[in-house]
Image (tube, grey):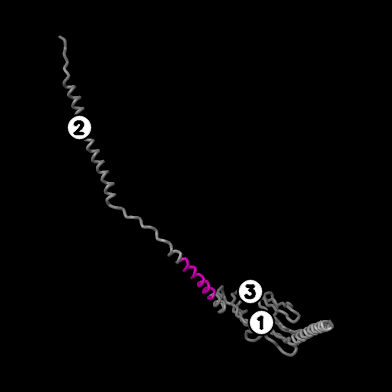
Amino acid sequence: MFEDTFMTHDAKNSSRWTFVYTILALACHLQVCVGECVPSVLASRRTLYKSEGQSMSLSCDVLHCGQKWTGGWGIIQEHFKFLTPSPRVHLYNETITYNTTRLFLDVQNLNRSDSGSYQCNIKWEESNSQGHVIKVNVTAGHFMPEPTGRKLSYRLLVCGAASLCFPLALALACCFSCRPAPPVPPPRSRNSSTARVKPKADVVYAVVALDRPRQQNTTQARTARTAVIYSTVNFSNT
């Protein structure tokens, strides 16, 4: 009984120490994570193709880690130049987390002079940081060449669709080949057509043969009537 109580007490103490060690480890880990925050600028490198009159929207994230900073969006043509707000150019910020701020750039009614390399340039207390360059090509008219990545995705999509259609076409071909061919009608014999034609000829000849006696009877009747008329004799009383 005493041994069971002692073992239970040791188990409770070990679980408490395990819980304390876990809390301490988490606290140390959080402290290390907070201490490892490095100020930087996050932006994706890409190339945009736009036509005159369109609009574009760019953004970059400033990981300031609580430090003071200045700067923002700029364009690199011959040299780097910070952009200033105007009726066409809109600049604004948005707080994402305690240590991160997102910088937005919206340009309306693009023209050829807006072509160039855009970049976020941030100045810290002791250093500077730049984000990845975003190249913008503004072309005249509505022609916009597609990026290489988009062309590759379209090719992969077409290949995938073709690979799916091929088994379907093969299955349809097998189904049509399995159907029995329709029976061929037997050819008509020439004897039957001849047999059908002969009765018509016989009927025609039979009619002609019957018409002749009627003509003879009619002639005889006329002759008989004439003979009766000419054989009449009239007697007169004198």
Name the residue that disc number 2 marks: 216
In the rendered image of this protein, does residue 221 appear above or below residue 182? above
Q: CA distance from mark 1 to mark 2?
A: 123 Å
The image quarter in which residue 184 lies = bottom left
Residue 220's label in the rendered image is none
In the rendered image of this protein, does residue 98 appear above or below residue 170? below
Task: Name the residue rendered at 27%, 52% in the picture.
Answer: 190
Asked whether the viewer can see residue 68, the reply is no
Lower sequence index among marks 1 and 2: 1
Foreground tag (2 vs 3): 2
Name the residue that disc number 3 marks: 55
Horizontal side of 111 relative to 178 (left or right) equals right
Name the residue that disc number 1 marks: 43
The image quarter in which residue 131 lies = bottom right
Lower sequence index among marks 3 and 1: 1
> Which sits in the foreground, 119 or 139?
119
Residue 33 in picture, x, y percent from top left: 74, 85
Q: Label 1 near label 3: C-beta < 8 Å? A: no
